[in-house]
Amino acid sequence: METPQAPDMNRRRFLGLAGAAAASVAAAGAIAGVGSVATVDAAAPLLGSLSAPAFGAINVFETVPDGSQRVIKPSSLNVRGAGHIATTPLPGQRGVSVIAGHRTTSPRPFYNLHKTKVGDLITWTPAGGPAVQFKVVEIAVLGDITWRKATLPDGTQGTEAEATFVEIMDPVVKYGSDTRLNLYACTRPPYAGQPWRVTGAGQSIPSARPTSTSYRLAVFAVKV
């Protein structure tokens, strides 16, 4: 069982992630005709697959920290499916597992992430292991405004981007669960009058469409 990472460590790792999430799609041919990523990390290990009503089935590969172990290599985001952030636990293990995916960079596994609804079930099937299910409890659009200063959860001063990523990576018990799954991808802000955060059953943020590197669409789920 892995020990959850401290939020301040995860916050520093985010500094190298700035504009992207991890990449690609699950089943070969699922979105045929959209082309291929320019540089794909063919050596990235396959960890398993995710499936959900909003985005179907996608493969999940491991991302790789750089030599400092503090940031994620941009090239490691160009995998053949979504990317599991290597510094977080695997889905189903205690703590917060984080998986990120491109929305428009081919083959765009999270293109339809905005169709996710509170209450949807997300199934994680590890390679060679039993499936684990998660229930979506909250969906939010989070700002990534790096020039705006903010007080971080540990009381230090930082940028809003750092504070945003702490919310995605924070391993503390939340929603009554210490085994959680967070998905995220770049997005546009919601239309005027639409919510930036929803928690009610069946709610979604349909206008959080692809894509802008200034915002993140985050899906928060708990193990069932």
Image (spheres, rainbow, N blue to C red):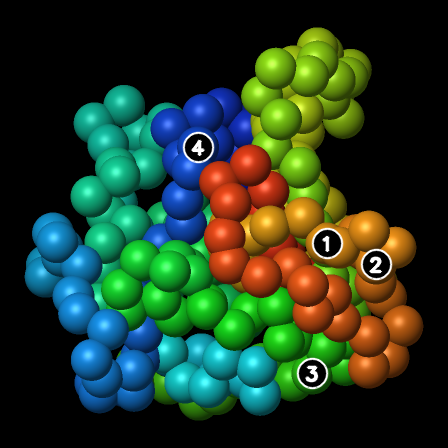
Crowdedness of circle 3 by 10 Å Cα count: few (<14), some, many (20+)? some
Residue 52 in the image, given as x and y percentages of width and height: 54, 84
Q: Which residue is mark 1?
A: 190
The span from disc 4 to disc 3 (Cα, nearest Å) is 28 Å
Q: Residue furthest front?
A: 192
The mark total stands at 4
Amino acid carrying label 1: it is Pro
Residue 203 in the image, given as x and y percentages of width and height: 82, 75
Front: mark 2 or 3: 2
Answer above or below: position of 132 versus 62: below
Q: Which residue is mark 4?
A: 18
Mark number for residue 194? 2
The span from disc 2 to disc 3 (Cα, nearest Å) is 20 Å
* Residue 88 visible in rendering: yes
Answer above or below: position of 111 versus 213: below
Front: mark 4 or 1: 1
Helix, strand or loop for disc 4: loop
